[in-house]
Image (spheres, helix red, strand yellow):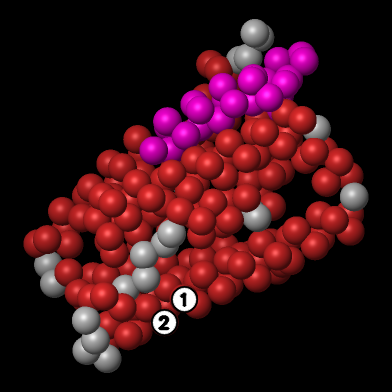
Amino acid sequence: MDVNIFGFMPALLPVALSPGASFTLVMNSALAGGNKGLFKTLAGTALGIYTHAFFIGLGITAVLVSSPAAFVVLKIFGTVYLLWLGAVLIRSGLTVSSGRSTGTIHSVTLKEAWLANVLNPKAILFYLTVVSQFAGTKGGVFNYFTLASVHIVVMSIWLFAITQTLIFSAQKTNPLMLKKYVNIVGGMMLIAFSLYPLIY
């Protein structure tokens, strides 16, 4: 096995630690559902990362990206899905201001977190262009799974630390109002992340 884990780490850290769709979903889930919501979203995101590793290890991703029409369709589906999820979060945050109960706060499901990762063109291109450089000369599913596991561990430690701070802050303030603003801002961020590739 000639996987270059130590070379992979400097390339991974800026991606794993920067805000993106998964970051936004985890923040909203942790606030809406506590640690249960956090772990559900982390598990969905991890499944998405392993899905990318599996597809690229089998060569399916390279075939998909080599077909401009197929990749455009995937980008459209990914954009529409993130727009829908962003709208759900915004609507959930706005219902709090109308005096409804905390039960109206949307908690991201495992399936939604998985789809948000799998349909994200940035994640596909990251695994195809960056991760493939560290998967060894022969690549293969096992090598990509190894790098995906490193990705998941780094991402999970970072997001767990951030969300614990958020959950602690929610206990010290008005949790309902914090949930309201996190859902609205999170939904707006998801919409921005989904539209950014179309604008630039």
Using residue 193 as the reference point, say whether residue 164 is left or right of it.
left
SS at badge 2: helix
Residue 20 visible in the snapshot = no
Circles 2, 1 touching at the beta carbon (< 8 Å) = yes
**Image quarter of residue 138:** top right
Q: Which residue is mark 2?
A: 91
Q: Marks 2 and 1, how far apart in space?
A: 5 Å
At horizontal 17% and vertical 69% (from top left) the residue drawn is: 175
Q: Nearer the viewer, residue 5 or 145?
A: 145
Q: What kind of secondary structure does the magenta stretch mostly adopt?
A: helix
Q: What range of the chain is rendered magenta?
A: 132-156
Quadrant into which the C terminus falls: bottom right
Residue 18's spot in the image, x, y percent? 47, 46
Q: Which residue is mark 1?
A: 88
SS at badge 1: helix
At horizontal 57% and vertical 40% (from top left) the residue drawn is: 49
Using residue 118 as the reference point, say whether residue 71 is left or right of it.
right
Q: Nearer the viewer, residue 55 or 7?
A: 55
